[in-house]
Image: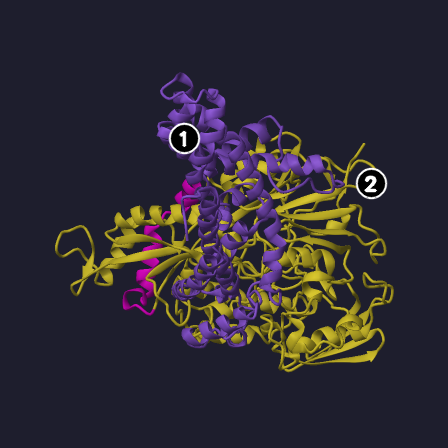
Chain colours: A purple, B yellow
């Protein structure tokens, strides 16, 4: 097992390098640049040149790439081109806790709601309950995040005043845990919706398959109660594919939250990524791309490991 | 002090739209001379004495970058710098400089020396006194060859800055500079006692700019919650008296939709309202709206490197073919004014005695025919020497008004036999395409924010075509000469006269097809008192704002 993990990690290195080359090239090929912000008669063309030279933007792309990779290997993501002098790692560190919080809460929310519904659905297939769960989850899948977010803000926040419109806490108010939670509910709910739909479907399908297995019949034949059959024998096997999904959900930490963070003014890394892309803040874009890529690799790794833990049939 | 500099990306991304050229620095504060309160709800006359207390939350789409007036170039940063720093001079309602940190400013006869006496009762936020050393220190930064910030052209005429005594400073200029008093002297003063040991080359990236900016302004820096807000609190020892408000929170909001929602829900107190949302905002209870002409204009520019746009008759014909009044009415709900010159009607230098080219498609056809453009093959599109009069009009994505304008232009130009195709490009890519050294466009729709002190050199002088901001390649020798001469003129009436001539030439030549001046609207709580509408500065005299809390 340990050797398998090490092998997987080693295999990830060339993969990550490949990802960085491609993303670096794409980012640099995008038209425009950080100096587009300097369209102002008070800014002399020489100053624009100075800026370009200072940050090495005039060097050939491969030179920039090697330099950047070298720095990054030493843990240095560089400094922002827009917020001059601010280390990229600091900017990300400032935002990461917000995103993590949102992600963890929304994932928990999705799990708590969707897995029981998925199981219920599977144990009573083609019942009224199953149909309503199915329809609801398809609706959840089909609803765009930003739309749902805006609708909730419109009705629950603006019209009814039940929830804040955005941000992480009430400004100019003393710290209060309830206030933080209050701000977290809507964005976490919106973010959970899409996950929930998927998770419910996966759970249902997987459980449905398990329920028909011979060992389930054997368990029933032995005289175990139906709940015990389902929750002891069925669940463990039924959830294996679902667990894999968690690993694969990890990469959406950055990408998945961009829209929701925009809509709810949630200061996380999704929003940072969005803003940096439009400002062509290359070091920030690259750092976040690399982190994303690492998440993808780690996510897959975790999925495989969990699989191994939960499914004794798998050997390495 | 208020630095409204070039627009930034975020602003543009969302909605704000105008690309702000701000030739103006510093405190140049333009107060709208008349009719400032066109808001739907009457502002109550201040009742009683101002009351101390209250926090205001200002909503902004742009996120600030750093708080050092010599290094930041975006609007959000400038807004916050305006709370934290003061310049030697500020601006009054008539674009005239007024003393701020300066007690007295004397210009020598030849206009080459400014002697500035400083106030002696000013302290920085950390309690250290402000004096001549701080001024000398601040102004020597952009003069230093290691200076790598993006502010600099304003200091090109500055030769040296010397301390005479603790409260007197002399500025020596290389040549006469009509803008120096109102703009050159308006930059925020930095504390020498904190930054003296920082090499100039490193100053732009120093922690001071992001973690602990210290100035002399009415508000002190308190917190910057990254991606969320910047908070400043009242400076108890402000030399013009403690501000009435306890704090200002500058909240960063992702886009225009959120901004409106947050304002409606009361999570944000003060916003700038785009004309397209004005009606919606007017219906919110408990608010007041202050409106007036903004200090900017939107134009249609033609790439004069292309032969077909080089003739002024053709450009006049294009303007005749465009119904600008309809654009203002239909696209902007009448929320603006048709423009004829690159100068605001609010400015003392405004001259409306210029040739104008109203909507007249027949005249346009005549002029085009005279220039050899006729429809020889009967396909409805004019042609000349086998070339069709067909081109694209670029503008930036995300600016709803401009996106609509290019579509209207397409329809209007079609009526005189010109085929114009709209092309919408993302901001950063757009700027790269249209400006030096690419000039990859036929025509474009863009806007400039205007300086409170008129100086068109950077935009219309022929020397600025190859690498500067004259990316339409407008060239006129006479205009060149006048713009150069104007730089040497210190007398305001003479300056106005010479600029009157420059505007006549620019209008006659149709250097741009000037489209319109937009209005600006600012919404705030009903009980906010002491607000003065200012075309350029949203937060003009914010230390005099107060909440009527009765």
* Residue A104, position as x, y percentages in the image: 57, 42
Residue at the image position 21 percent from the left and 63 percent from the top: B372
Give the SS element for disc 1: helix
B67 on left or right of A237: right
B371 on left or right of B328: left
Q: Is residue A184 above or below residue B155?
A: above
* Residue B322, position as x, y percentages in the image: 35, 50
How many residues crowd mark 2 within 10 Å: few (<14), some (14–19), many (20+)? some
Residues in magenta, as a range? B305-331
Instruction: Look at the image and tell me in which quarter the N terminus of chain B lies.
Output: bottom right
Residue B330 sits inside the magenta stretch:
yes
Q: Quadrant of residue A154?
A: top right
Cα–Cα span, label 1 and label 2:
67 Å
Q: In the depicted view, which residue is nearer to us: B65 or B307? A: B65
Q: Is residue B11 above or below residue B107?
A: above
* Residue B312, position as x, y percentages in the image: 34, 64
Q: In the depicted view, which residue is nearer to us: A292 or B484? A: A292
Residue under pointer 1: A207
Chain at numbered mark 1: A
Q: Which mark is residue B51?
A: 2
Q: Is residue A301 visible?
A: yes
Farthest left residue?
A: B377
Q: In the depicted view, which residue is nearer to us: B86 or A299? A: A299
Give the SS element for disc 2: loop
């Amino acid at each position: 097992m340990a050797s398998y993990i090490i092998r997987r990690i080693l295999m990830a290195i060339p993969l990550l390098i490949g990802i960085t080359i491609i993303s670096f090239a794409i980012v640099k090929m995008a038209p425009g640049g950080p100096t587009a912000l300097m369209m102002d008669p008070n800014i002399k063309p020489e100053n624009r040149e100075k800026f370009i030279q200072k940050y090495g933007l005039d060097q050939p792309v491969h030179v920039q790439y090697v330099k950047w990779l070298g720095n990054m290997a030493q843990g240095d993501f560089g400094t922002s081109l827009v917020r001059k002098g601010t280390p990229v790692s600091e900017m990300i560190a400032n935002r990461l806790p917000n995103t993590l919080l949102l992600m963890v809460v929304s994932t928990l929310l999705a799990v708590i709601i969707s897995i029981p519904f998925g199981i219920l659905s599977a144990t009573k297939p083609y019942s009224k309950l199953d149909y309503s769960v199915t329809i609801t989850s398809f609706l959840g899948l089909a609803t765009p995040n930003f739309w749902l977010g805006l609708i909730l803000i419109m009705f629950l926040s603006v019209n009814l005043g039940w929830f804040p419109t955005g941000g992480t806490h009430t400004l100019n108010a003393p710290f209060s845990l309830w206030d933080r939670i209050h701000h977290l509910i809507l964005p976490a709910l919106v973010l959970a919706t899409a996950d929930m739909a998927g998770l419910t479907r996966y759970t249902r399908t997987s459980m449905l398959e398990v329920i028909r297995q011979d060992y389930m019949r054997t368990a029933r034949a032995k005289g175990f109660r139906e709940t015990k059959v389902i929750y002891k024998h069925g669940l463990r096997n039924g959830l294996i594919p679902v667990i894999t999904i968690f690993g694969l959900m990890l990469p959406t930490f950055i990408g998945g939250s961009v829209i929701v963070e925009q809509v709810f003014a949630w200061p996380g890394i999704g929003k940072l990524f969005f803003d940096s892309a439009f400002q062509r803040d290359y070091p920030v874009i690259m750092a976040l791309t690399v982190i994303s890529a690492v998440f993808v690799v780690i996510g897959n790794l975790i999925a495989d490991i969990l699989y191994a833990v939960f499914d004794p049939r798998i050997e390495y | 002090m208020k630095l409204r500099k070039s627009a930034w990306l975020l602003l543009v991304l969302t909605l704000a739209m105008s690309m702000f050229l701000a030739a103006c620095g510093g405190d140049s504060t333009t107060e709208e001379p008349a009719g400032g309160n066109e808001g739907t709800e009457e502002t109550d006359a201040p009742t009683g004495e101002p009351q101390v207390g209250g926090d205001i939350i200002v909503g902004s789409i742009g996120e600030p970058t750093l708080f050092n007036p010599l290094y930041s170039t975006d609007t959000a940063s400038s807004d916050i710098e305006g709370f934290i720093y003061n310049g030697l001079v500020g601006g009054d309602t008539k674009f005239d400089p007024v003393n701020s940190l300066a007690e007295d400013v004397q210009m020598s006869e030849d206009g080459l020396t400014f002697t500035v006496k400083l106030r002696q009762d000013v302290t920085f936020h950390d309690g250290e006194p402000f004096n001549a050393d701080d001024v000398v220190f601040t102004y020597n930064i952009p003069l230093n060859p290691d200076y790598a910030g993006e502010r600099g052209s304003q200091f090109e005429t500055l030769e040296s800055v010397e301390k005479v005594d603790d409260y007197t400073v002399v500025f020596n200029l290389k040549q006469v500079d009509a803008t120096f008093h109102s703009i050159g002297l308006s930059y925020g003063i930095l504390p020498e006692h904190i930054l003296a040991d920082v090499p100039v080359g490193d100053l732009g990236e120093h922690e001071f700019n992001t973690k602990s900016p210290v100035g002399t302004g009415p508000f002190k820096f308190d917190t910057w919650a990254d991606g969320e807000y910047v908070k400043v609190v009242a400076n108890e020892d402000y030399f013009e008296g403690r501000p009435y408000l306890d704090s200002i929170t500058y909240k960063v909001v992702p886009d225009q939709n959120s901004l409106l929602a947050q304002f409606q829900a009361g999570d944000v107190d003060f916003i700038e309202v785009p004309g397209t949302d004005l009606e919606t905002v007017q219906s919110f209870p408990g608010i007041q709206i202050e409106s007036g002409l903004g200090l900017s204009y939107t134009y249609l520019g033609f790439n004069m490197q292309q032969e077909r746009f080089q003739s002024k008759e053709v450009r006049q014909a294009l303007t005749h073919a465009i119904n600008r009044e309809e654009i203002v009415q239909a696209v902007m709900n009448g929320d603006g004014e048709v423009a004829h010159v690159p100068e605001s009607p609010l400015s003392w230098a405004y001259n409306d005695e210029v040739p104008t080219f109203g909507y007249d498609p027949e005249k346009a056809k005549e002029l085009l025919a005279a220039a050899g453009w006729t429809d020889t093959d009967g396909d409805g599109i004019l042609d000349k020497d086998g070339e069709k009069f067909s081109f694209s009009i670029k503008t930036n994505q995300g600016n709803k008004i401009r996106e609509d304008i290019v579509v209207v232009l397409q329809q209007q130009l079609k009526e005189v036999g010109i085929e114009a195709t709209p092309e919408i490009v993302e901001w950063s890519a757009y700027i790269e395409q249209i400006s030096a050294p690419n000039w990859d466009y036929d025509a474009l729709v863009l806007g400039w924010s205007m300086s409170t002190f008129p100086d068109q050199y950077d935009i219309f002088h022929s020397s600025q075509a190859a690498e500067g901001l004259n990316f339409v390649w407008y060239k006129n020798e006479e205009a060149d000469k006048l713009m150069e001469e104007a730089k040497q003129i210190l007398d305001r009436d003479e300056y106005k006269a010479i600029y009157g001539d420059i505007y006549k030439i620019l209008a006659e030549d149709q250097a741009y097809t000037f489209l319109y001046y937009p209005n600006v609207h600012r919404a705030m709580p009903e009980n906010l008192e002491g607000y003065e509408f200012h075309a350029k500065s949203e937060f003009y005299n914010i230390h005099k704002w107060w909440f009527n809390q009765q």
